[in-house]
Image (cartoon, helix red, strand yellow):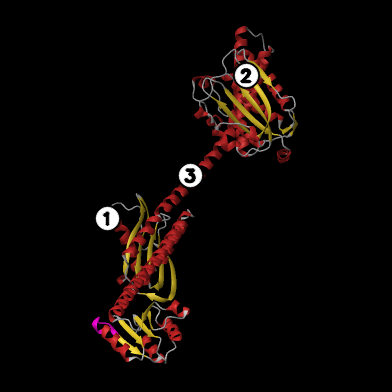
Amino acid sequence: MVRIFVTTEKNELISQYSKICERNNYAFNFSSDAKIIESMISAETPDIILIDDSTPTIDTKSLVKTIKQICETSILILITENNDIDKDLLKTINAIIPAKYSENLIEATISINLRMKGSLQKLSNTNKDLASSLYRLNTLYNTSSQFAGTLDKEKLFEYMIDGLDKSLSFSLTSTLSFCDSTNPVLILHSLYDVSEELLDAIKVRAIYNYKSIFDGKDLPYEVTAESLKVIKSIKHPSNKYNFTLFQFDNMFSPIALGENFYGCIEIFKENHFTSDDAKCFQSITQQVTLPLKSATLYQEIIETNKKLEQLERLKSEFISIVSHELRTPLTSIKNSLDILHSGKCGEITPASDKFLTMAKKNVTRLAGIINDLLDLSKIEAGKMDFHFNPIQIKNVIEDVRTALAGLAKEKSLEILTENNIDLPEVMADSQRLEQVLTNLLSNAIKFTPDNKSITIRTQLLNATEITYHPSFANDLKSLHGDYIVVSVEDQGIGIAEDELLHAFDKFAQIENSLSRKVGGTGLGLPIAKQLLEAHKGAIWCDSALEKGSKFHFAIPVDSARVKELV
């Protein structure tokens, strides 16, 4: 019922407002004593309080202040004949009624203010609901952020339960977790402790709920009450729940994504869950499944990587052992062939010479393969020795060009050089740079048709001036300062664009008929790449099918890089 209170001593006002309240079925009270007014409105809060400012026994401003402290939700209407109302008073009252207002206008004013009070109350309730929803959304957001921040399964379950506690204020949660399939765990988070009998019942209930999810189908994990490990987290251990817990309202959900099953959870609350509570519960238990899947995959990747690392280590050890074991007999074979070919063991016929030459050539080729394998194993083990000294790159180029001149002559290939005369010295291991350049030049000779030419070019470039195919951006974007760039350009068959980066993969062979014809281990370029990385340099290539290839490598010349190598 609507309650109207009038603070006045005027009988005509009391009579007038009494009639209005009677017509509208409003409860009516009045008084002109400040203490009685305070007592009456404290006992029953009026919806509207009308204050007659002409009452001599009342200090209007003081009374309004008191009313506001006691009745925050009441509508205050000032009855006055005064045209000059105090500004502070105007700030605190809701409406004004002139003393000689007609009853119809008074009724209309009261009615309007009652509707306004109802609207304000609805708005207040809406704001409370909104604040509750915002808090819950914030909890969901924070919980989601926590899910995204870890790949630890145990922490993901902790974050899930913490999010449910903050958003639902549960009495107890029973979470059956299969983070470790060999050791399933029952996680209890409870407001109060549980008795041993109740704990046994909760374990049986959790297993029953788990089995009911699969409805007679094969269970992903076997679990018994006797083997089930329990982890308890109790907020107030001084009190204990008993079997009345099962009379509480409850919700249950599996924690699964597709065929991936991670556990199940049951939540109990002494008060009833609302439909919004159910949505929040389902939202959190579903949100955790994707991070759990990611965590599972991450764990599988870690385990797979460990196996791969072990296999890689075994492979490197195997290559190293086999290479060493092959080198000894191969050296004996080479020495024996040299002796036979020298004629010390008898006359060499043209046929014998042909076969001995062929054998020596293949022994040399096999020795090169073994050396590549040994170099690879040394580099991967971090045992490759380097001897850095100031050198002129043109000397390295000339030595390699001279060494491979005979091989080029066999195919009538011309090796051209375009050297910058003013190139500075670089701090490098000349033997390793010769190994890199020998590999590039010998490849160019292999893949270039007869009667063509190969060009070795050197330039001094700043890192910002170096151009390269996007495939090599990750390798070259970290370069800075000045570099000597050596390029080996051939007129061979070229490499398809999608194969460029794979040219530097271990044991890679570019798929075309010529590469299969010339053969090779596919180790030369990967070794060259790692040798150049040891020099703080880089290697890359440009090519297109039937348009030849350009292989480039860069060696730093700036003093800061030189100090890093010494």
> Closer to the N terminus: mark 1 or mark 3?
1
Cα distance in 3D space between marks 1 and 3? 34 Å
What x and y, as percent, mark residue 12?
Answer: 31, 89
**Quadrant of the rendered image containing residue 531:** top right
Q: CA distance from mark 1 to mark 2?
A: 74 Å
Q: Amino acid at mark 2?
A: Ile
- Tell me if I can see residue 91 in this picture: yes
SS class, disc 3: helix
Where residue 403 sits, quadrant-wise, is top right
- Residue 491 versus residue 105 in the image, above or below: above
Dot 1: few (<14), some (14–19), or many (≥20) neighbours within 10 Å?
Answer: few
According to the image, label 3 marks what residue?
304
Q: Is 64 within the magenta?
A: no
Identified at 65% across, 35% down, the residue is 463
Tell me, yes or no, whether the two marked residues, 1 and 3, touch with CB atoms within 8 Å. Answer: no
The image quadrant that residue 65 belongs to is: bottom left
Q: Front-most of 30 and 530? A: 30
Three-letter residue code for mark 3: Thr
Name the residue that disc number 2 marks: 454
Whether residue 230 can be seen here: no
Range of residues picked out in magenta: 22-27
Q: Nearer the viewer, residue 37 or 516?
A: 37
Horizontal side of residue 391 vs 151, given as left or right: right
> Can you tell which mark lies on residue 215?
1
Tag nearer the camera, 2 or 3 = 2
Q: Position of residue 195 (x, y in %)?
A: 38, 73
Q: Say if 262 sits above or below 326 in the image.
A: below
Location of residue 451 with respect to 102 vertically, above or below: above
